[in-house]
Image (tube, rainbow, N blue to C red):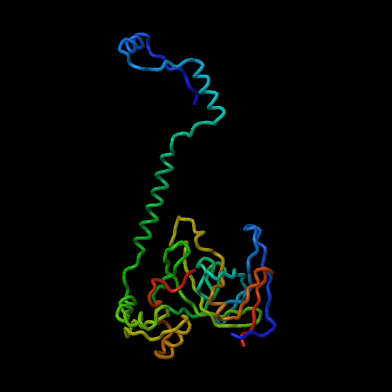
C-alpha cells in the first residue's frame, strides 16, 4: 500500500483554520518517509481472510459437536458398577473388575485385565465381559 | 523379581531419521492361535496396556488378534486428555521365541477425531507397560539398548 497525500479543498482548509480546529497538513516529505519506512519494514498485513476464518470455526464447532454427541449415555455396565461402587472403592481401589450384565454382578476382580477376565471366565463359563477400573473413568492410558 | 544372568534377547535402539533420535523399536510376532504376523512396535511405557493398535493399522496389516474380551466399548484415556472407546483382544505375543499371552487394545482415533489432527495418538503399534509386567525387561538408556530376561 502506497501512502498518498490527501488534500482537502482550500475552502474546507480555510474553515478549519478559522474555527481553530487542530489538523495536520501532511507534507510531501512525510509521505516519502512513510513509503520508505514501509519498504524497510515490509508490507502491512492484508485484510483478514474472513472465508478461511469462518471455515476454520465451522470445522472446530463440528468437532466439538461430534465430541458432545459421542459422549455416551450411562450404560448397563455403569448401572451395575454403581450398585457396587461404594464397596469396591473401599476394598479394590485401582483394580479392574469384570462385570456380567446378564446377572448384574461383579464376576471377577484383578490387578490386570487378564486376571479379572480369567477369574470371571472360570466363575461363569462365559467368554465376554465388561470392564471398569475401580475409581477411574478409564481403564488404560494410551 | 530375580533375574537370570544372561538376557534371552537384546536389541539396540533404532535411529529414527524423521525424529532424529534413537527409539526402542522391536520386531515381534503377534496374532491369534491360528495366525501370527511379524510387525515392528515402539516400546512406550506411557501406554499402560500390553500392546496397543489403531484400528486402521489392524485393518491395513490384516491382523487377526484372537478373542475379543468385551461386550461394550472400553474407555481409554489418550494423551491429550480425551476418552476414546476401544476394544480388548486376547492375543499371543512372541518376542525372540518367548511367547506370552497378552491383552491388546484397539482404538479408532481417526473416527473419534474426524478432521482434527490425529498426531495426539501414535498410529504405530505400541508395546506398553503391560509388556514390562509380562516379560522381564531392562532398558539401558546410556547404551541405547533394551534387554529381555527370563524371570526366575
Residue nearest the observer in this picture, B106 or B146:
B146
- Image location (x, y in percent) of residue B63: 55, 73
Q: Residue at x 31, y 80 (%)?
A: A86
- Image location (x, y in percent) of residue B20: 65, 58
- Judge from the rendering whether residue A73 lies leftward or rightward of residue B65; answer left or right: left
In this rendering, the answer to whether B114 lies above or below A9 is below
Q: Quadrant of residue A67?
A: bottom left
Residue nearest the observer in this picture, A121 or B120:
B120
Q: Quadrant of residue B142?
A: bottom right
- Image location (x, y in percent) of residue A89: 36, 79
In this rendering, the answer to whether B136 lies above or below A17 is below
**Mark count:** 0
Q: Quadrant of residue A135?
A: bottom left
- Image location (x, y in percent) of residue A57: 39, 48
Q: Residue at x 38, y 14 (%)?
A: A8
- Judge from the rendering whether residue B35 lies leftward or rightward of residue A93; answer left or right: right
Amino acid at each position: 500500500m502506497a501512502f498518498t497525500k490527501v488534500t482537502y479543498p482550500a475552502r474546507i482548509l480555510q474553515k478549519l483554520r478559522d474555527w481553530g480546529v487542530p489538523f495536520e497538513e501532511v507534507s510531501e516529505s512525510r509521505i516519502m518517509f512513510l513509503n520508505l519506512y514501509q519498504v524497510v519494514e515490509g508490507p502491512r498485513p492484508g485484510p483478514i481472510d474472513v472465508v478461511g476464518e469462518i471455515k476454520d470455526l465451522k470445522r472446530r464447532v463440528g468437532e466439538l459437536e461430534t465430541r458432545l454427541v459421542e459422549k455416551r449415555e450411562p450404560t448397563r455396565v455403569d448401572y451395575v458398577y454403581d450398585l457396587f461402587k461404594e464397596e469396591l472403592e473401599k476394598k479394590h481401589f485401582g483394580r479392574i473388575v469384570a462385570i456380567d450384565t446378564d446377572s448384574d454382578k461383579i464376576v471377577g476382580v484383578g490387578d490386570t485385565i487378564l486376571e479379572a477376565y480369567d477369574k470371571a471366565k472360570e466363575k461363569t463359563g462365559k467368554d465376554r465381559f465388561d470392564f471398569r477400573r475401580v475409581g477411574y473413568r478409564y481403564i488404560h492410558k494410551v | 523379581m530375580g533375574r537370570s544372568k544372561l538376557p534371552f534377547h537384546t536389541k539396540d535402539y533404532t535411529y529414527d531419521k524423521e525424529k532424529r533420535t534413537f527409539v526402542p523399536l522391536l520386531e515381534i510376532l503377534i496374532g491369534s492361535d491360528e495366525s501370527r504376523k511379524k510387525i515392528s512396535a515402539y516400546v512406550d511405557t506411557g501406554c499402560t496396556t500390553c500392546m496397543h493398535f489403531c484400528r486402521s493399522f489392524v485393518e491395513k496389516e490384516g491382523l487377526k488378534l484372537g478373542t475379543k474380551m468385551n461386550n461394550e466399548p472400553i474407555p481409554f484415556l489418550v494423551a491429550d486428555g480425551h476418552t476414546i472407546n476401544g476394544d480388548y483382544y486376547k492375543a499371543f505375543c512372541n518376542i525372540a521365541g518367548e511367547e506370552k499371552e497378552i491383552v491388546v487394545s484397539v482404538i479408532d482415533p481417526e473416527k473419534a477425531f474426524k478432521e482434527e489432527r490425529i498426531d495426539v495418538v501414535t498410529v504405530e503399534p505400541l508395546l506398553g507397560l503391560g509388556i514390562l509386567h509380562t516379560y522381564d525387561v531392562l532398558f539401558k538408556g546410556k547404551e541405547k539398548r533394551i534387554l529381555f530376561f527370563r524371570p526366575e
